Amino acid sequence: MTTSKRTIQGYNGVATVDKKHQIIIDAQAFCEGQEHHTLKPILGTIKDRFFRIGISDDIYKDGIVVTTNMGFSNEANNQYLKAEKINAYIPDNQFRSRDPKFKDQKSKYGHLHPGKGVDKGVIPASEFDFNSVKKTCTCPQGNPM
């Protein structure tokens, strides 16, 4: 699976659930780090399944609402949903970059994910002494915790 960092062994699992009946109606694994490209095949599988078992000729024309996380947000998916007239809600993953309230966020709080080699001010666990009998820990400065 190719991610933004590197290629790793793994899969991206996507489950589709029916909120009203609290059941899983579809689950698939994709060999991609991003999930936005999986929306169309997932929705197609669900439509076919509901047609095949006789629940609905077109589940998306029956007034259901599709909700996803922001990993599915991109322009191609928005165009697909509009063209197919599917009532869907996908959070906008670019919202903060356009909202003026967040323009100073990075300068004020820094990046959300600091890069490798950045000092995070964390003392490694190997520097602490653990007493397994007393179930206590001593910090590098000798203070009990």
Image (cartoon, helix red, strand yellow):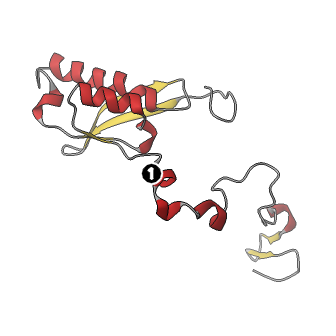
Residue nearest the observer in this picture, 136 or 140: 140
Left-right relation of 17 to 122: left
Residue 106 drawn at (x, y percent): 63, 60
Q: Residue furthest bottom?
A: 143
Q: Residue furthest front?
A: 100
The quadrant holding residue 140 is bottom right
> Disc 1 marks which amino acid?
Phe
Residue nearest the observer in this picture, 73 or 25: 73
Residue at 64%, 67% (x, y): give it.
Answer: 108
Residue at 83%, 83% (x, y): give it.
Answer: 143
Left-right relation of 10 to 132: left
Assess disc 1: are there few (<14), some (14-19) or many (≥20) residues with their C-alpha within 10 Å of its C-alpha: few
Left-right relation of 8 to 97: right
The quadrant holding residue 43 is top left
Circle 1 sits in a helix, a strand or a loop, which is it?
Answer: helix
Give the quarter of the figure containing the C terminus: bottom right
Residue 102 drawn at (x, y percent): 52, 61
